Image (cartoon, helix red, strand yellow):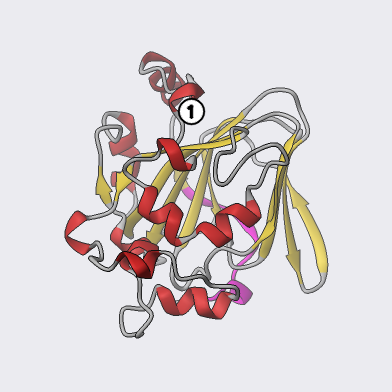
Amino acid sequence: MLTRKQLPPLARIKHKIDITMLREFIRDNHYDDYAQYNDIKYSGASNHQAFLVANQYSKEHFFKEHDAEFLEGERYRQLYLTNIDPKKMTSDNSLLTSTHHTIFSRTRRTDPTSKTYVPETDELNYGLRNEHCHGMFSQILDMFSGQITRVRLAMLGGNFEIKPHVDYDPSYITRYHIPIFNNEQVIYGFKVKNQNLEFNMIEDGGIYFFNGGHVHWVKNMGALSRLNLIVDTHGQTDLIFE
């Protein structure tokens, strides 16, 4: 598996979709109604509360809004297309609330061989497709040969930004972004070798590899909301760049 240092911060892969059909599917099924997006909001994320609680330190730090209470932000919203396999959830709720303050302690919590392993933090347990994963969403996921893990629609409100943070090294989770409603005022930033690099994503059906192992951030400096489909996989067989 290639690591973050061996891969570009952002690059298009050879897979491509019909963006016109995807937008029509989004509109026809009312996925452009962001009121239903609340899987990153603690009080409304019934299927994902365990994930939020287990990762509360990260989520509260990265997505905090000045006027929002604990994990109750509105300007960055997600709608999950996959759930955790209930057979893999822990019965020890104290594990969920154990804090982690470094990337190393967080990584140990995702390692099944570690004493501090928490199944709810392990992306590999989140590949169970739910009721939202149908039609064109299913077709898109079927394009990938890697093991599908967490998949979600992610809305970033206008004039809002996600703070710099690190997710996972691509050797563990390989992340792809499919821009659905985007514009040149949405900036994706990465810190690589002490340099700040900024990119745009073109909404033409392209699929972008997103290197979450680097410190990164997103700014929507426009008035309109951005919508991306984010697909996480385990494995790098789809990493064939244009």
Where is mark 1, residue-wise?
Answer: 19
Q: Give the residue furthest to the left.
A: 87
Q: How many marks?
A: 1
7 in relation to 197, above or below: below
Nearest the viewer among 78 and 71 is 71
Q: Is residue 166 magenta?
A: no
Q: Position of residue 94 (x, y in %)?
A: 36, 68
What amino acid is found at the position of numbered circle 1 in the picture?
Answer: Ile
Question: Can residue 26 be seen?
Answer: yes
Quadrant assignment, res 111: bottom left
Give me the residue at 51% from left, 57% from top.
Answer: 56
* Chain part drawn in magenta: 2-14
Q: Position of residue 95 (x, y in %)?
A: 36, 70
Q: Is residue 232 left or right of residue 203?
A: left
Q: Is residue 211 left or right of residue 96?
A: right
Q: Position of residue 52 (x, y in %)?
A: 45, 52
Nearest the viewer among 93 and 76 is 93
Q: Is residue 232 left or right of residue 6?
A: left
Give me the residue at 43% from left, 23% from top.
Answer: 31
39 in relation to 196, above or below: above
- For mark 1, give the secondary structure: helix
